[in-house]
Amino acid sequence: MAPVERARQSDLRERNLAAVLALVADRTAGAGAASAPSRAGLAAATGMARGTVSALVDALLVGGLLEEVPPPPRTGAGRPAHGLRLSGRRVAALGVELGASHAVACVRDLTGAVRAREAVPSIDRTGPPAQVLAASAELAGRVLADARAQGLDVVGGAWALPGLVDTGAGTLRLAPNLGWRDVDVLTLLGEHPALHGLPLAVDNEAALAALAELWHPGEPADEAPGSRRGASFVLVTGEVGIGSGVVLGGRPLRGERGWSGELGHVTVDPAGPRCGCGASGCLEAYAGQEALLARAGLAGGGADDLRRAAEREDPAALAALDDAGAALGTALAAAVNLLDVDAVVLGGSCAPLAPWLAPPLQRELERRVLRARLLEVPVRVSATGADAAVMGAAALVLQGVLDAPAPLLSA
Ligand SMILES: [Zn+2]
């Protein structure tokens, strides 16, 4: 075979492997083994020949990316076929969230299950970026060791960062809440011995949180299975800062440079308090964690302190949360009016505070969104809760495996 012809054949095989894997992932997402497709089902759905599909499935089984599900009990004539689903036995991915006041690392296997997780409640962010990143790399190293001890092959890692990220260059361009500017994150992480040889990526934490919501819809009872494909929502996330990820028609909306979603710097009141970005009256100055704690009289405390104060109906905490929810509603009404998304999803530090934030938020949406007179704008809590960004970071790597599985298989 001529070299060009051989390259074409290998391209075709890579695309077909990805197509088979994507179809299995799609058919079995959250729905369990009942819908696990057979080889014949895959052939029918892809239009490929049975023999071609069988060879691809065999390669994916041997590579540990798929596994067979025993057929249901025999009911009539004919031999029932084995179903196929993603395997959680081999391939896994590392996710790390480097927040302004905490860090979390997790390893998810190919089925999306979390196999190892560790959180450090407070990382000293006053040190130089190299030092803060090294602390996150050590955290990652411990989680990696846990996953590898379970026999998992961690194929890559991604860091969820607050602020404007250049994913191509691997740099954090601007993060007011960390006080960082133009930090070469990937180079600094790559030098750490705990991460030696591991392919790494960086992205914005809110964009990754939105990916997690798509990747792990959590099947809320009011959603039909498979509805994530056409999902559209604004997901609010963050802690000290407030970010958002927009998903339209099942696809993340990133903007020209991936710098969209800075909901925290949408103006709620031009005459409002000063924001860390230099402007005034930004959403973050009302609903960011530090602003919320200060207004609740809990400056220096944490998210748990605020939740506990709200649970015991502390008036200052309730007033701060009511103001924050209304400010979120004002900013999100602008987003819904502009983008016509179906729903608002609360993630990050907003998730555990949803019982107090959601009612005033909903009230503002009803008042300010034109469409709300025709169609409600539901507010719900992220399926991944406060861990949305770190779950999304691992999902970014796993999505890469589903898109291009061939390098993980022997030819
Ligand atoms: Zn601002």
Image (cartoon, rainbow, N blue to C red):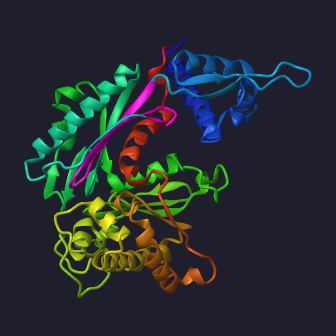
Where on the picture, by quarter, is residue 274? Answer: bottom left
| Residue at image location 26% in from the left, 86% down from the top | 270
Q: Quadrant of ligand 1?
A: bottom left
Q: Position of residue 156 (x, y in %)?
A: 35, 31
Above or below, 139 relative to 9: below
Q: In the image, what residue occupies the spot 33% across and 26% down?
A: 146
Question: In the rendered structure, which segment of residues is drawn in magenta?
Answer: 91-114
The residue positioned 52% from the left and 14% from the top of the image is 2
Q: Is residue 26 magenta?
A: no
Residue 198: x and y in percent read: 29, 28
Question: Outermost residue toward the top?
Answer: 1
Can residue 133 be seen at all in this image of the molecule?
A: yes
* Image quadrant assignment for residue 311: bottom left
The reply, left or right, for residue 180 in relation to residue 339 is left
Q: Of all residues shown, which one is farthest toward the right?
A: 77
Residue 301 vs residue 406: left or right? left
Q: Nearer the viewer, residue 350 or 180?
A: 350
Q: Position of residue 180 (x, y in %)?
A: 14, 55
**Residue 208 visible in the displayed image:** no
Please indicate whether residue 59 sits to the left or right of residue 117 in the image: right
